[in-house]
């Protein structure tokens, strides 16, 4: 059976449309915003977890501890602490990786005149009005340039998925 290229193309186009049906086009953009909003919290979390390890602050009753204890199996406190510490170090590494990815994306747009539109909203917690006053422009200009910069960061963070 011979397949016509135009028919094959139509089948592929329909399959792709069906696959992306119901998936909002702005998902990577929204994910970038979500990651930017989480940036400061992740940094605090890393510092808090490092402090907990350094000062041996182990929760007495927590899912993190309970999962290391099994019924009928005696596990020493040292083994529990070692497992808990290793688990927490893995969480710290994952959070630090996320922070470094966001830092790279921020560096990408850091030299832009309108960088404060991103930094102000997501990192410093400024309002659009305060940002507009700081860089002497109108509020719609703040939103327009923040969108442009977040789009640029989205491509850095998500690659080709961000431009489809």
Image (tube, rainbow, N blue to C red):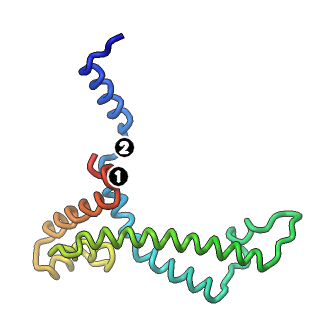
Compared with 61, 52 (above or below) is: below
- Residue 20 image point, x, y percent: 36, 39
Look at the image and tell me in which quarter the N terminus lies: top left
Disc 2: CA contacts within 10 A as few (<14), some (14-19) or many (>=20): few
Along the viewing direction, whichever of 22 and 35 lies nearer the viewer: 35
| Quadrant into which the C terminus falls | top left
Residue at the (26%, 71%) spot, across then down: 118
Viewer-proximal residue among 100 and 15? 100
Mark 2 to mark 1 CA distance (whole Å): 8 Å
Q: Circle 1 — which element?
A: helix
**Residue 50 occupies which quadrant of the picture?**
bottom right
Whether residue 28 sits left or right of residue 149 in the image: it is: right
Residue furthest to the bottom: 55
Q: In the structure shown, which secondary structural element does the residue marked by tag 2 occupy? A: loop
Where does the image place residue 37, in percent across and percent down from the top left? 37, 70
User: Which residue bears the numbered disc 1?
Assistant: 27
Q: Residue at x 73, y 78 (%)?
A: 60
Q: Return the residue found at the far top.
A: 1
Percent position (x, y) of residue 74? 86, 70
Quick one: 157 or 144, which is closer to the camera? 157
Residue hosting label 2: 23
């Amino acid at each position: 059976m011979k397949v016509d290229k135009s028919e094959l193309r139509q089948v592929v186009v329909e399959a792709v449309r069906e696959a992306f049906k119901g998936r909002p086009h702005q998902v990577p953009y929204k994910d970038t915003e979500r990651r930017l909003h989480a940036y400061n919290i992740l940094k605090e979390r890393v510092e808090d977890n490092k402090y907990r390890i350094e000062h041996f602050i182990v929760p007495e009753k927590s899912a993190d501890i309970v999962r290391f204890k099994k019924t009928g199996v005696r596990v020493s406190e040292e083994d529990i602490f070692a497992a808990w510490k290793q688990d927490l170090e893995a969480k710290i590494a994952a959070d630090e990786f996320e922070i470094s990815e966001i830092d790279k994306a921020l560096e990408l747009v850091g030299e832009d005149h309108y960088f404060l539109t991103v930094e102000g909203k997501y990192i410093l917690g400024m309002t659009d009005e305060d940002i507009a006053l700081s860089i002497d422009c109108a509020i719609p200009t703040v939103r327009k340039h923040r969108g442009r910069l977040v789009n640029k960061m989205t491509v850095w963070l998500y690659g080709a998925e961000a431009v489809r």
